[in-house]
């Protein structure tokens, strides 16, 4: 009975999430002006479910009513890595594991950022990893291997991105080729900060902004990162929308994946809750704006993570399952092939329901926005 009540309560949260029905229905246009794509690296359904058990406030995942599933297999493997998974989202093609913005035949493919920038649509990328890491890199670069960090950083400088926030200082100014890519970015009108995330008042007059705050990656939540991800999401939205410009923003919660690889449920859950807070910032803006599509998904699942009854030991030494308490357990230190949920809110959200391939996310975004490449 308790489980039945819980499932019912989750259904109610999914429909209302303690917000008015008006929030769900508030859409000003059928065609979104803005798209915010949030990628929880390594986040499968059990990772999402952990927010409903371990977050002290109502999870923002519960605010969606349009939900689908994607198959994440890469072009050559049943189980994808982050590079192939993100390239599917960024460029609309299935490719081999390790590929950054290139097709299975190793030819460069155009990304969402490259498609929309010439249309005067502002763009941003945020990550808790290095900006050269697989997921952000796939939106900003083209490389035969995700391991080519310095090549990827150099490629990023050539894009027309407007807002960057993440780690990776060493790949910009401590390079083997001696280049200082921060100089290149400043020549392209970037305001650069390598110390701390600022406030909107400090950047509102800038044309482009890059916060590169970690030598390599950002620290984990448990090691002092604080509210970087939700704050960067809010700041990125403010900056990209400052002149009521249309915009595309990708936000990655990178380290949910790392908690999965480490089989560390505390690490995983703390990063998932942080990512859920970033989702809340995107949804709050979309609710006020009425013209913004929010999509939340993942490149793959990591760790074979599941929520199971906590194992306890009786006085006689025998173990038993305590059904009143859950804990995270793992079946692998790698990725799994499980289907991944897709959550959508705002104009065009219904397009993301159903079961489909991961690269369809790219094509569905172009379809609902009517963003078309300049030929």
Image: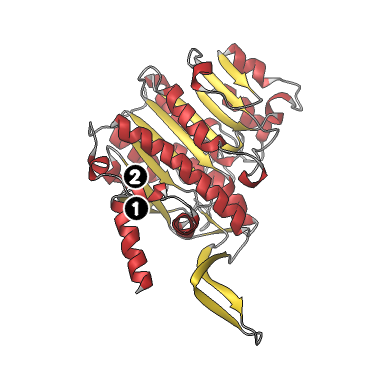
Badge 1: how crowded within 10 Å, few (<14), some, or many (20+)? some
> Please, which colouring scheme is shown?
secondary structure
Residue 261 in view: yes
- Which of these two is toward me, 374 or 316? 316
Q: Where residue 84 appears, x then y in whole percent? A: 53, 46
Q: Is mark 1 on a helix, strand or loop?
A: strand
User: Which badge, 2 or 1, is on the more N-terminal residue?
Assistant: 1
Q: Residue 266 lies in what quarter of the image?
A: bottom right
* Quarter of the figure with the N terminus: bottom left
Q: Residue 362 lies in what quarter of the image?
A: top left
Residue that badge 2 annotates: 344
Q: Where residue 241 appears, x then y in whole percent? A: 39, 23
- Which of these two is toward me, 141 or 6? 6
Residue that badge 1 annotates: 68
Q: Distance between the residues labelled 2 and 1?
A: 8 Å
Left or right: 170 as drawn, with respect to 48: right
Marks 2/1 in contact by CB < 8 Å: the verdict is: yes
In the image, is residue 232 above or below residue 117? below
In the image, is residue 146 above or below residue 334? above
- Residue at image location 33% in from the left, 36% down from the top: 293
Please name which of the two marks, 2 or 1, marks the residue nearer to the observer.
Answer: 2
In the image, is residue 179 above or below residue 355? above
* Quarter of the figure with the C terminus: top left
Count the marks. 2
Q: Residue 31 lies in what quarter of the image?
A: top left
- Which of these two is toward me, 13 or 73? 13
Residue 103 in view: no
Q: What element carries label 2?
A: strand
- Residue at image location 59% in from the left, 58% down from the top: 265
- Residue at image location 50% in from the left, 44% down from the top: 275
Q: Where residue 136 appears, x then y in whole percent? A: 54, 36
């Amino acid at each position: 009975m308790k489980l039945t009540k819980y499932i019912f309560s989750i259904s109610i949260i999914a429909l209302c999430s303690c917000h008015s029905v008006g929030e769900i229905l508030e859409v000003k246009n059928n065609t979104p002006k803005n798209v915010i794509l949030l990628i929880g690296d390594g986040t499968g359904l059990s990772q999402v479910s952990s927010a409903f058990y371990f977050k002290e406030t109502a999870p923002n995942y519960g605010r969606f009513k349009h939900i689908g599933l994607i198959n994440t297999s890469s072009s050559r493997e049943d189980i994808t890595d982050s590079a192939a998974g993100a390239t599917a989202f960024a460029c609309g093609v299935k490719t081999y594991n390790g590929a950054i913005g290139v097709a299975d035949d190793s030819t460069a493919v155009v990304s969402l950022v490259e498609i929309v920038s010439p249309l005067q649509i502002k763009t941003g990328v945020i990550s808790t990893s290095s900006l050269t890491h697989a997921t952000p890199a796939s939106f900003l670069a083209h490389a035969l291997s995700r391991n080519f960090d310095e090549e990827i950083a150099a490629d990023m400088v050539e894009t027309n991105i407007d807002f960057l926030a993440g780690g990776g200082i060493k790949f910009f100014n401590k390079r083997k080729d001696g280049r200082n890519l921060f100089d290149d970015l400043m020549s392209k009108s970037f305001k650069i900060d390598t110390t701390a995330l600022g406030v909107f008042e400090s950047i509102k007059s800038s044309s482009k902004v890059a916060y590169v705050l970690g030598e390599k990656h950002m620290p984990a939540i448990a090691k002092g990162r604080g509210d970087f991800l939700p704050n960067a999401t809010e700041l990125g939205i403010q900056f990209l929308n400052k002149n009521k410009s249309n915009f595309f923003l990708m936000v990655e919660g990178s380290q949910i994946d790392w908690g999965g690889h480490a089989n560390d449920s505390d690490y995983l859950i703390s990063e998932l809750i942080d990512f859920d807070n970033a989702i809340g910032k995107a949804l709050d803006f979309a609710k006020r704006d009425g013209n913004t599509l929010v999509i939340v998904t993942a490149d793959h699942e990591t760790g074979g993570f599941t929520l199971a009854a906590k194992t306890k030991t009786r006085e006689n030494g025998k173990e038993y399952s305590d059904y009143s308490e859950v804990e995270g357990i793992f079946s692998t230190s790698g990725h799994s092939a499980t289907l991944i949920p897709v959550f959508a809110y705002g104009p065009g959200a219904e397009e993301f329901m159903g079961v489909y391939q991961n690269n369809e996310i790219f094509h569905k975004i172009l379809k609902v926005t009517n963003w078309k490449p300049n030929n």
